[in-house]
Amino acid sequence: MLEMVITARAADLGHGLKVRRVLPYAKRRMVGPWIFVDHAGPVTLAPKDTRAADVRPHPHIGLSTVSYLLSGQVLHQDSLGVHQLINPGDVNWMTAGRGISHSERFTHPDSFAGGGLELMQLWVALPEKVEETDPAFTHYPAADLPVRDEGGVWMRLIAGEAYGMKSPVKTHSPLFYLHTEWQAGASLALPGGHSEQAVYVARGEIEHAGETYEPGQLLVFGDDKDAVITARLRSTLMVFGGEPLGERHVFWNFVSSRKDRIEQAKADWAAGRFALPPEDNQEWIPLPG
């Protein structure tokens, strides 16, 4: 059954790059291992504003970032020396582990093609036994990800297993993540098979159990294969879930099962003990506060 509906809060990353922030939420910190959900855009910036909107190098620990574009283009650079463009449908899966830094840069006009830059940025908390694993980065082109059509619903499986598909994306705990496109009037039950699952309305309008939901809303369910979603309009939905990992502490870009580890990461970034991307090391985002 439907457990909760979360409405995204507006946040401004600066210089015109605005996001809908969904997780974490005061009354619901995580869905399965998913601990952070941001929906950026769609946004188109003038050439003079592109450079100012760049996300400068910043650090992470204890999580994997999952970057997925609905439109536009982003350049990822990290402290492992990775230099990778991400295009719509591709997956950038960056595991921070004991520590990594990266930047996200935009170029004009490529970054704002296809109706403007629109990015889904989700984070997955890591199981305790791998929180301090070596940092890693893997890029998965859209062509490598399974897709299927199901009664007016097109879907691409970004990670995990769902609806008879299995993604090649390597994960550290049981989870799934889907990009779905719905024709008006299409209905489909959630995949189930995990303790927690959620539906995020990126575009359009949907109905569940007689109630209507709009863009920016996240519907959180338990393991319910009978939860049916119906699209009232053409809709884009991001569907994800998995198994809980236990309590996690979050500060800025740091996630850990231990408060003292968060404090150590804060001190390390402030003191310059994180490596910076070798091709992007002349500026960085300072520790908040």
Image (cartoon, helix red, strand yellow):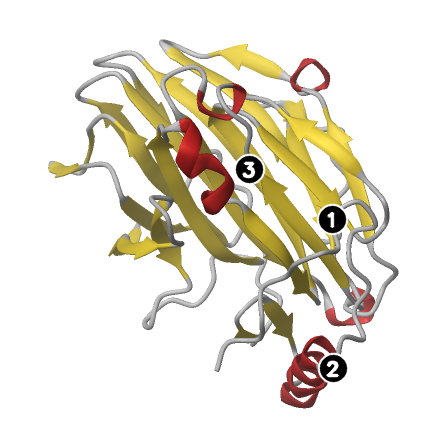
The label on residue 203 is: none
**Under tag 3, what secondary structure?**
strand
Answer with left or right where residue 265 lies relative to residue 235. Answer: right
Residue type of the residue flagged with mark 2:
Ala
**What residue does disc 1 label?**
280
Q: Characterize the local packing of mark 1: few (<14), some (14-19) or many (20 or more) Cα atoms within 10 angstroms.
A: some
**What residue does disc 2 label?**
271
Residue at 49% from the left image edge and 23% from the top image edge = 72
Nearer the N terminus, badge 3 or badge 2? 3
**Residue 176 drawn above or below residue 271:** above
Q: CA distance from mark 1 to mark 3?
A: 30 Å
Instruction: Give the quarter of the image for residue 256.
Output: bottom right
**What residue does disc 3 label?**
177
Answer with left or right where residue 35 lies relative to residue 90. Answer: left
Q: Characterize the local packing of mark 3: few (<14), some (14-19) or many (20 or more) Cα atoms within 10 angstroms.
A: many
Residue at 47% from the left image edge and 62% from the top image edge = 30
Residue type of the residue flagged with mark 3:
Tyr
Tell which of 264 and 250 is nearer to you.
264
